[in-house]
Image (cartoon, rainbow, N blue to C red):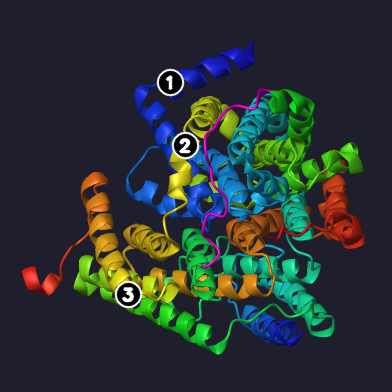
């Protein structure tokens, strides 16, 4: 109930914002009968309309995970974001091993197992992609080896 | 005769050792991907696209490899359905209904062989159907103008939306999310940036590969973190595998009927393989009546959904190749592959790039035989794969997704976007909002708008032009029916629940 209602409201707000920003799209002097604004505005309108259905006739709630699981999910997202930023400056091997180990730990909380899984995945994937498939991965931090 | 000439062209390409090797590799990878719980044809193909692109395959090779993976994943999906009671992908859900009870009754090997052969029959007949029907449909497709294309895109969203969720409003929202994302970037007609929020990274628009990998692969990791990978220990033992000739002979008509049903369901734009296996199972169930014992582990209950599912996988290629409108989530991913390879699907594909189309069809025929060999005598190899623990598999999948997207663009922005799509996919699926319409929207949004705008240029802004031809009217009517009808048929079309222990 509540889940769908909140989702419906969020979609409604986003759809209205979308319509508002679609109105701001600049048109050039060379334009067609429809122009660049109409289609996005139609989409926004349909989205807003459908969201009202969710607000007024919501489905039963799904089973939301416990707060701790949400914590684990948040950590996973954080790890992935940091991994995305680390990939370029730190090379492939180190960030991949850490990120894979942390993800593995979130799925099955066994520290030693996770650490080994991370190291093996990092090394194994590097060998496969670098040598078997020939992708240009950089193994180590660029700063170390210039 | 033209068909034979075309086929021989196709086989001359597909039988080259290199292409053949790709087909075998693709089948092998595909079966593994399909059988691993949490990886299905959509996300399996999705994480491989960026890689096949960076590896620099030419169009035919990439297409052969990826469609073999696609067919292979369709075969493989049944393995985890039968042994673990976890559908490896969505269409394999129906296979759990009889497959798992049969496996629990000690006939796991029989169930795997029957379903493997049913898969082969379905996929083989559908490939023949594709061969016969696609050129015909390609000829009809020449009659399609912008008004008809616009109606066709709408039809795809409506039928997919009608089938994909139990709540039409949710699938409509999903389509809108996809279409809204597709609008971001520089407008083709006016050359002005739209809805980018001034972010330079967004001027090129959102790459659909990033969205696909995020929604399908990264979101899966979050689900496994939520469940702590609990659900995936093998519940039944597989002793020796023999071929149950009697069961196979008894189910011959079931396989044929279900291949037909599945193929037709697959052709419908947007409906896809899930509908195929569902209709096949339900029709056989009502045909057999109460005495058929469906749901208790009968051979027909395994053969029906597998034949339907694999036939639908072939059928879904028909609208994808001839009209550029995918018939299922995975064909949407394959369409993404075609677009990445700079191949424009549609009627002109058949006249201008016959080697691509017929090479692909020939490769599919070969892939089918390879898959039959892999899935019946060698099925034990893939059962072993199921024992890879999720705590290794899922981090591996994530890292491969990152490598793929990173090697495509080399920008951390795309990686962040991919994580964002992963979170979005998790939330949407939690709320029972289907994610396939989002993909379809991102993929087709630009074309859909173009069709509308071109139609309006032709008619000088007269909206009635959209309904001016009989084809267009037919498509509009089907679209509305496809969206509305499932609301009234909820009672009949209710999806059966999974078997619980």
State whether residue A144 appears in this view. Answer: yes
* Quadrant assignment, res A141: bottom left
The residue carrying pointer 2 sits among few (fewer than 14), some (14 to 19) or many (20 or more) residues within 10 Å by Cα, namely: many
Whole-percent x and y of residue B47?
44, 55
Tell which tag, 1 or 2, sits nearer the viewer.
Answer: 2
- Image position, residue B447 (x, y; %): 63, 54
Quadrant the C terminus of chain B occupies: bottom right
Element class at badge 2: helix
Q: Closer to the camera: disc 2 or disc 3? A: 2
Note whether B56 is above or below B168 in the view shown: above
Q: Is residue A82 left or right of residue B65?
A: left
**Which region is colored magenta?**
B230-245
Pinpoint the chain carrying mark 2.
Answer: B
Q: Residue furthest top?
A: B1
Residues beneath discs 2 and 3 located on the same chain: no
B357 with respect to B32 (left or right): right
- How far apart marks 2 and 3 lie (CA) works out to 32 Å
Check disc 3 and report the residue beneath it. A83
Mark 1 in CB contact with mark 3 (< 8 angstroms): no
Kindly identify which residue carries mark 2.
Answer: B27
Magenta segment: does it hold B236?
yes
Q: Is residue B478 magenta?
A: no
Write down the quadrant of residue B252 in the picture. top right
Point out which mark residue B15 bears.
1
For the N terminus of chain B, which image quadrant? Answer: top right
Q: Are marks 1 and 3 on the same chain?
A: no
Residue A104: image location, x then y, percent? 38, 70
Residue B460 in which image quadrant? bottom right
Question: Which residue does the image show at 61% across and 50% down from the upper left?
Answer: B81
- The location of residue A137, given as percent across then percent down, is 22, 58
């Amino acid at each position: 109930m509540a889940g769908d209602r909140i989702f419906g409201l969020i979609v409604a707000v986003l759809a209205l914002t979308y319509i508002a920003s679609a109105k701001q799209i600049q048109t050039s002097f060379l334009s067609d009968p429809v122009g660049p604004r109409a289609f996005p505005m139609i989409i926004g309108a349909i989205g807003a309309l459908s969201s009202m259905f969710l607000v007024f006739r919501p489905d039963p709630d799904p089973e939301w995970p416990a707060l701790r699981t949400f914590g684990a999910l948040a950590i996973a997202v954080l790890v992935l974001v940091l991994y995305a930023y680390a990939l370029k400056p730190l090379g492939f091997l180190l960030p991949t091993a850490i990120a894979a180990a942390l993800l593995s730990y979130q799925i099955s909380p066994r520290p030693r197992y996770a650490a080994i899984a991370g190291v093996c995945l990092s090394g194994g994937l590097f060998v496969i992609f670098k040598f078997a498939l020939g992708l240009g991965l950089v193994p180590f931090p660029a700063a170390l080896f210039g | 005769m033209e068909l034979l000439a075309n086929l021989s062209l196709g086989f001359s390409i597909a039988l080259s050792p290199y292409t053949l090797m790709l087909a075998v590799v693709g089948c092998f990878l595909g079966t593994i991907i399909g059988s691993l719980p949490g990886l299905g044809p959509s996300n399996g193909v999705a994480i491989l696209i960026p890689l096949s692109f960076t590896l620099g395959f030419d169009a035919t090779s990439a297409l052969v490899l990826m469609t073999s993976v696609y067919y292979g994943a369709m075969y493989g999906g049944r393995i985890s359905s039968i042994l673990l009671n976890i559908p490896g992908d969505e269409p394999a859900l129906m296979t759990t209904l009889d497959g798992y009870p049969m496996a629990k009754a000690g006939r796991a090997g029989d169930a795997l062989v029957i379903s493997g052969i049913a898969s082969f029959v379905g996929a083989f007949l559908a490939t023949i159907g594709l061969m016969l029907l696609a050129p015909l449909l390609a000829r009809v497709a020449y009659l399609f103008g912008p008004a008809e294309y616009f109606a066709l895109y709408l039809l795809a969203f409506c039928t997919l939306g009608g089938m994909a969720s139990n709540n039409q409003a949710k699938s409509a929202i999903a389509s809108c999310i996809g279409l809204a994302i597709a609008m971001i970037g520089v407008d083709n007609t006016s050359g002005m940036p739209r809805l980018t929020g001034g972010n330079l990274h967004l001027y090129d628009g959102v790459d659909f590969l990033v969205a696909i990998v995020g929604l399908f692969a990264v979101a899966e990791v979050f689900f496994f973190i939520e469940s702590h990978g609990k659900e995936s220990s093998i519940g039944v033992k597989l002793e020796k595998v023999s071929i149950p000739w009697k069961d196979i002979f008894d189910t011959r008509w079931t396989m044929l009927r279900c291949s037909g049903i599945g193929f037709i369901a697959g052709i419908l734009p947007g409906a896809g393989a899930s509908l195929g296996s569902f209709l096949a199972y339900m029709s056989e169930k009502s045909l057999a009546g109460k005495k058929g014992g469906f749901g208790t582990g009968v051979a027909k209950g395994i053969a029906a959904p597998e034949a339907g599912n694999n036939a639908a996988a072939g059928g879904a290629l028909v609208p994808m190749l001839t009209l550029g409108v995918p018939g299922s989530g995975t064909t949407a991913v394959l369409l993404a592959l075609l677009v990445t390879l700079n191949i424009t699907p549609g009627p002109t594909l058949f006249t201008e790039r016959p080697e691509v189309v017929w090479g692909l069809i020939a490769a599919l025929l070969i892939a089918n035989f390879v898959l039959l060999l892999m899935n019946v005598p060698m099925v034990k190899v893939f059962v072993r794969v199921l024992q890879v623990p999720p705590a290794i598999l899922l981090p591996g999948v994530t890292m491969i997704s990152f490598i793929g997207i990173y090697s495509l663009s080399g920008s951390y922005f795309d990686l962040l976007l991919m994580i964002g799509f992963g979170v979005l996919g998790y939330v949407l699926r939690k709320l029972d909002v289907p994610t396939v319409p989002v993909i379809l929207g991102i993929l087709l949004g630009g074309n859909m708008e173009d069709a509308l705008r071109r139609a309006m240029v032709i008619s000088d802004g007269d909206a009635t032009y959209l309904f001016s031809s009989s084809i267009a009217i037919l498509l509009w009517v089907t679209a509305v029916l496809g969206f509305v009808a499932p609301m009234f048929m909820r009672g009949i079309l209710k999806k059966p629940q999974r078997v619980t222990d």
